[in-house]
Image (tube, grey):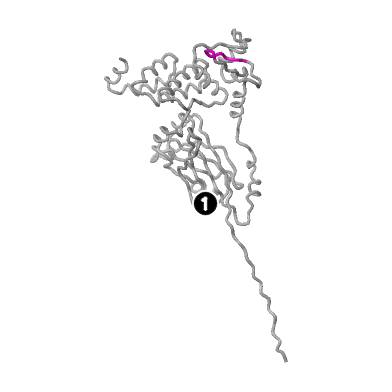
């Protein structure tokens, strides 16, 4: 008689834990860097918030260093902006070479680190980065700072929580689909297309024409407002002659009017660059554009030497640029022979 054996059932199950990341890249452009570099240690400028994996982030740059012990450095951090948020992420903080447009990695966290923006940890774990990102003197003399602009790029890879959905999480963020502000970019594009889109005035600068929009010029300069909409003779003229300015200088002035950015040709030598900034200082004073004037003053004051101090001081006196003159007083403490050499 055959024996009866119990029948058993065996079930094998399997699961996989696959770590995924959601990447975001944000470029933080600091326009007028020469103004920001005067910030005290511990003071920072912050980028707009950007989304990655449903969390909000920002880049913090400390031009004067994170604290008194790091004043010779620029400090850079990436910070979680989502209240009570907690996530692990690796990140790469880069600088954009203004000549080539290519990024250079300066500081990176190759392995994920925890960002915890809870009430308990917001002071110690809400931001990550480095207090010694780059020495200030090395940065300011590098190809990363040009036309008084600096671009810091942050690439962040956020670890997606187990079982989570990065697309769903991203959709939960109210800022996930909001584009960055682009008014200055649109105005800049309007200038590039000025010959065919709404241009209503042309400036003839030593034989070179520049088409522009009266309303934009008037909005940015009280002098343009008076000349284009006031009782001056240029009020109705479709073409205005400018004979006492170089075309390259007027072009840079016009670009600043539209984009609020100082953009100079990239192939200028050091002497040519300084001379063009000096001429822009004259133009800024002529058209009462205070922001451009201050930027030019700061650029020139940083590059003063025995060959340029006398010319810059003369221009400061001519155009009543108080900030430039005040910086020149530093040189009065130098040996008398040095000043005599300049005055000769």
Residue 76 pos. (x, y %): 47, 41
In the visual, does 124 lie left or right of 338?
right
**Residue bearing the label numbered 1:** 114
Residue 61 in the image: state x and y as whole percent.
48, 38
Residue 19 location (% of width, % of height)? 57, 56
Give the quadrant of residue 322: top left
For disc 1, the neighbor class at 10 Å (few under 14, some 14 to 19, many from 20) is some
Indicate the position of residue 233 as horizontal and vertical percent values. 59, 7
Query: Foreground residue, 44 or 337?
Result: 337
Residues drawn in magenta: 201-207
Q: Nearer the viewer, residue 304 or 207?
A: 207
- The quarter in which the C terminus is drawn is top left
Q: Secondary structure at mark 1?
A: strand
Is the residue 95 above or below the residue 168 in the image?
above
Dominant secondary structure of the residues highlighted in magenta in the image: strand
Q: Residue furthest right?
A: 1
Asked which quadrant contains residue 209, the reply is top right
Quick check: 270 left or right of 197?
Answer: left
Residue 22 magenta: no
Up the image or down, 220 lies above or below 73; here it is: above
Quadrant that contains the N terminus: bottom right
**Point 45% across, 15% down: residue:** 319
Marks counted in the figure total 1
């Amino acid at each position: 008689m055959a024996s009866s054996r119990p029948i058993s059932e065996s079930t094998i199950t399997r699961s996989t834990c696959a770590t995924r990341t959601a990447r975001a890249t944000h470029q933080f452009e600091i326009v007028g860097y020469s103004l920001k570099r005067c910030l005290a240690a511990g003071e920072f400028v912050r980028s707009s918030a950007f989304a990655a994996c449903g969390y909000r982030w920002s880049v913090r740059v400390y031009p004067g260093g994170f604290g008194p012990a790091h004043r010779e450095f620029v400090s850079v951090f990436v910070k979680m902006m989502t209240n009570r948020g907690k996530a692990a992420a690796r990140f790469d903080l880069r600088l954009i070479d203004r000549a080539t447009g290519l990024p250079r990695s300066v500081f990176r966290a190759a392995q994920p680190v925890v960002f915890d923006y809870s009430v308990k940890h917001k002071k110690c774990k809400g931001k990550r980065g480095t207090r010694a990102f780059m020495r200030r003197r090395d940065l300011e003399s590098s190809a990363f700072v040009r036309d008084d602009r600096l671009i810091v790029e942050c690439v962040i890879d956020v670890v997606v929580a187990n079982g989570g959905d990065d697309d769903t999480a991203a959709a939960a963020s109210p800022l996930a689909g909001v584009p960055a502000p682009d008014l200055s970019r649109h105005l800049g594009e309007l200038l590039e297309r000025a010959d065919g889109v709404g241009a209503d005035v042309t400036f003839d600068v030593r034989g070179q024409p520049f088409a522009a929009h009266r309303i934009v010029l008037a909005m940015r300069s009280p002098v343009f407002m008076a000349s284009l909409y006031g009782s001056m003779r240029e009020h109705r003229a479709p073409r205005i002659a400018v004979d006492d300015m170089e075309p390259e200088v007027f072009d840079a002035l016009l670009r600043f009017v539209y984009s609020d950015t100082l953009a100079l040709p990239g192939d200028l030598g050091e002497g040519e660059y300084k001379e063009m900034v000096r001429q822009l200082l004259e133009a800024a004073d002529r058209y009462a554009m205070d922001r451009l004037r201050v930027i030019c003053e700061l650029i020139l004051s940083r590059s003063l030497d025995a060959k340029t101090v006398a010319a810059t001081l003369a221009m400061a006196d001519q155009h009543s640029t108080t900030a430039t003159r005040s910086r020149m007083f530093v040189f009065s403490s130098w040996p008398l022979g040095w000043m005599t050499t300049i005055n000769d």
